[in-house]
Amino acid sequence: MIAQTADDIEIRASEWIERRDFGVWSDADAKELENWLDQSPAHRVAFLRLDFEWRRTERLAALRPIKPQASEVPAGKWHRSLRIAAAVAVLGIVGSFGASYFFAQGGKSYSTPLGGRKVLTFADGSQIELNTNTLIRIAIDEHKRSAVLESGEAYFSIKHDASRPFVVTAANHKVIDLGTKFLMRTSGNKLEVALVEGSAKVEPAGGDPSHRAVTLKPGDIAYALPGSVSVVRKTPADIGSDLGWRRGMLVFRHATLAEAAEEFNRYNAQKIVIADPETARLTFSATLPTHDTHTFVRILSKLFNTRSQTTTEGIVISR
Amino acid sequence: MGMVEKPDNGSGKTGPGMAPAVSDVDAWFGREILPLEAVLMEFLQHNWRNKSDLTDFRQDVYVRVYQAAQKQIPDHPRQFLFTTARNLLIDRVRHEQVIPIEAAADLEALEIAVDTPAPDRTLMARDELRRVQAALDRLPPREREAILLGRVEGLSRREIALRMGIAESAVAQYLSRGIRGLVNTLCNEPPTVRRKS
């Protein structure tokens, strides 16, 4: 092979990134890129260097303008009314009084308790898997398929149907499935969408979608806040980690103790409290069962010599 | 060598014989090594006479660091990077058989460079958008326009071509050149904030 200079390799690497992010990109292209990267470590480091720094520019998406009058006011109203409907729906199940009035549009609520997990399978072959502490409302009929993720996290595996696209609303944003598998997590006004397979569109609910829709590709994670959507790309391994709960596991990769405690607390009534910011910043990698706070606490004491104390607040970890 | 870690027997986080996963090595490289590029280039410029092949030199350093990390991820990335750069400098000097006097003298002082403090990451994160925008402003107009349409408006190559009224192949050129321009600006700007040692 002819010796290439670092500049030649850099040009080639930038062409790969351009093709991946802006061109037509198939599995065959991804395979071709893999081969090129495997050809030489010089290819790999040049690509990594460009790709890592290039990702820093993804936050430019945050500059996308959003008109508050157009999207937020009607979306907020819509959202609030659904919140009430969902709250009443839960009451309806518990108190078994007729709530059919609130379901004029059709639909049904499903929820999981703290630490719970549930798989919903639908007649069209689609599956929705609910994680801990989740509330979702789903309406599927012969004309449309829609859901409102009120809170929590769900994994969607949707059978494509061009005449009935699957639309999920959460935190004032709509995710429109274009035949796909994706993970959605919402709390308060924040929404995170991770695309695993296929493609999906994220746009503000109720606003003019033409300029602000973001189309996600596999590996993309969209973070939506009122007024902005930014997209970052994760490796398949990282996305796999985010889906660990489907196997009942939490996967931590270079996670801080603060992040890990927050994750465990999503699943368990007995909370973990990290006593001080110094300890909260320690990082570790491990795969642990979602319910096994005790193993987590034990591992921390082995790794970092932490002490634990059970109080009314929960298990307090300190050094 | 004093306090400098040897590249070949650094005690990694994974056990001996357990090669780290490719994605872990890639993530480590991006997180620990790439942010040091400005400091590394300063070091190489200071110690290598032939300024024309600095990017090739940098690439060789990265390749060696990456290959070592594939076997075992070094505990002290910063020391590891600079020790690797230093050893490569020594190899080259030996290979050329003529020892340039200034290079030999500087080799004595290399360990000082290892202690150059890392940029403060929280401050960097806060300034990130501003820095990216500044880098963008340094691109030639057509490249900047193509990158903005792609990155801010989320358009594809084809849509950018329609918007700019030029061929898709030209857009591909502007985009890939824009990517390189942005990255090289972002990598080579000296860290803005340095902790006092």
Image (spheres, helix red, strand yellow):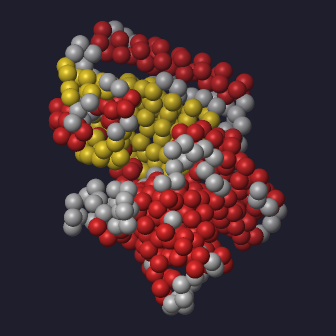
Which quarter of the image is occupied by the C terminus of chain A?
top left
Residue A88 is left or right of residue B131, and the answer is: left
Residue A80 visible in image: yes
Residue A280's x, y, as percent? 36, 32
Location of residue B141 with respect to A114 vertically, above or below: below
Residue B132's x, y, as percent? 67, 49
Q: Residue at x 34, y 39 (%)?
A: A282
Residue B103's x, y, as percent? 56, 76
Q: Residue at x 23, y 32 (%)?
A: A306
Residue B101 is left or right of residue A245, and the answer is: right
From the viewer's side, name the closer residue of A315 and B107.
Answer: B107
Location of residue A151 with respect to B185 vertically, above or below: above
From the viewer's side, name the closer residue of B155 and A60.
Answer: A60
Task: Tell me where residue A205 sits by quadrant.
Answer: top right
Q: Residue at x 71, y 56 (%)?
A: B147
From the viewer's side, name the closer residue of A3 and A148.
Answer: A3
Location of residue B162 with respect to A294 vertically, above or below: below
From the viewer's side, name the closer residue of A60 and A229.
Answer: A60
Task: Tell me where residue A260 sits by quadrant.
Answer: top left
Residue A9 visible in image: no
Residue A64 is left or right of residue A137, and the answer is: right
Marks counted in the figure total 0
Residue A284's x, y, as percent? 30, 44
Location of residue A208 with respect to B19 vertically, above or below: above
Q: Residue at x 43, y 67 (%)?
A: B83
